[in-house]
Amino acid sequence: MSVEIGGIAIAALVVLIFLGLPIGISMMVVSFVGVALIRNDTVAMRMLGQVANDSLREYLFAVVPLFVLMGLLVTVSGVGKDTFDLFERLMRRLRAGLGIATVFANAVFASITGISIASASVFARVAVPEMTRHGYGKAFSTGVVAGSSVLGMLIPPSLLMIVYAVLAEESVGRMFLAGVGPGLLLAVIFSVTILLLGTFRRSFVFDRPDEETVPDPFGALQTLRLAVPIVSLVLLVLGGLYGGFLNPTEAGAVGALGALAIALLRRSLTPRVFWNLLVETGQITVSVLFLIVAATFFSRMLAMSGLPNWLAETLLDGSLGHLGFLIVYLALVIVLGCLIDSISIMLILLPIALPVAEAAHFDLIWFGVLTVVAVETGLLTPPFGLSVYTIKSALQDDELTVGNIFRGAFPFVLAMIAALAILIAVPSIATWLARA
């Protein structure tokens, strides 16, 4: 009977979400009722209190507000524009070079923010006007920004990596390291996609297919001026983290301090703006931590029902097999990405999928990287496509439709699916650095 209660709980959760109830509250309600039915109300109340205590008392969770604050400070200080300007000049001689510059600028920006939506918002305002000025089509320009924005959740630091590490009980530092290889792989695949489109589908890339203007070069001194803040932050955060000098929480603190110093030196931080950033940081942090509490409660309720173990036995011992389970799981993640946000997908599916992945003897760090890549695909697919709507909102261009942005982003959806296939075939891309 407990397994049936677990199945009913999952169905009830899906129904509540589609009715519009917030994901965290839905998970709390379903989990409480599920535990009460399996045991009783007293056990459910005690488990709720224990989950809240166990989930949030870890020192590790200080990393969430620190990385969020760092990302917001970097956005305000104009580092994103400088990053694009720098790569714009470095890639100016390549075919469709501004598209490739956007990809690598987003990759670097991702390494100091960790939030895809921040990347989409910043580069929509910075890269798209510059690309259209040089003859690129609006659909392609916005598609490049939408596609490359997903690097924000893969290249560390990454909010999704933190959420996965908590749910899978893996090291946040190892998850960060695991994102480096796949992040670079995805950036290279995106660049190859742009080169191919620029060579064979010029009408898709350029409004004026026979004309591609090249940005003017600038001197070494100006290049150095643009590079110093970016390189300094990357060295502070990633250098300290990968060098073993800082743990993830300390790296977040150092990065936030460095971003604050840059914003102050550039005089882009008024007291009102700083207060608004602190309030926004608090709001994002509280929402993430509440979701983690709800997901932990949901996970324990499912474990109590025995549903994950039953699924592991049924799926892995049946005709589906290990690889079949993985493909079905990733396909389900991508489909859900068309409907709900990234963190919600992970919170719903991982409590069910992780026990099955463990029973299949998958490397959970590799499994986490695959999950993040598949989840991020949902940022580019209709009808939800959060990155697409972020770009539309940031540009406020009446002539640019959401459909045009989705069309421009479609080649990058295919590129991400190709990256998933490569990561499945060569797991060491995700694990070699994390397991070193």
Image (cartoon, rainbow, N blue to C red):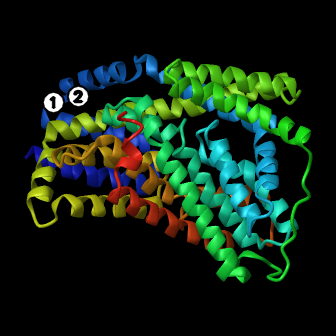
Identify the element where label 1 is drawn.
Answer: loop
Cβ atoms at labels 2 and 1 below 8 Å apart:
yes
Query: Residue 23: percent from the left, percent from the top?
Result: 43, 45
Nearest the viewer among 10 and 64 is: 64
Q: Amino acid at mark 2?
A: Ala
Quarter the C terminus occupies: top left
Placement of 29 over or under 238, stated as above or below: below
Q: What residue do we see at 41% from left, 52% from top? A: 17
Which numbered dot is residue 156? Answer: none
Residue 109 appears at what percent x and percent y? 67, 42
Locate residue 182 relative to residue 73 in the image: left or right.
left
Q: Classify mark 2: residues with Cα within 10 Å, few (<14), some (14-19) or many (20+).
A: many
Amino acid type at mark 1: Asn
Q: What is the distance, in whole Å, between disc 2 and disc 1 at their CAs?
A: 6 Å
Quarter of the rendering containing residue 293: top left
Residue at position x 49%, y 59% from top? 378
User: 111 or 285, which lies in front?
Assistant: 111
Residue 21 is situated, as x and y percent measured from the top left of the image, at 45, 48
Q: Secondary structure at mark 2?
A: helix
Assess disc 1: are there few (<14), some (14-19) or many (≥20) residues with their C-alpha within 10 Å of its C-alpha. few
Whether 111 is drawn above or below 52: the answer is below
Which residue bears the numbered disc 2? 44
Residue at image location 80% in from the left, 29% down from the top: 273
For residue 40, which numbered disc appears in the image? 1
264 with respect to 20 (left or right):
right
Q: Position of residue 199 (x, y in %)?
A: 68, 78
One can see residue 385 in this view: no
Which residue is more in the foreground, 228 or 54? 228
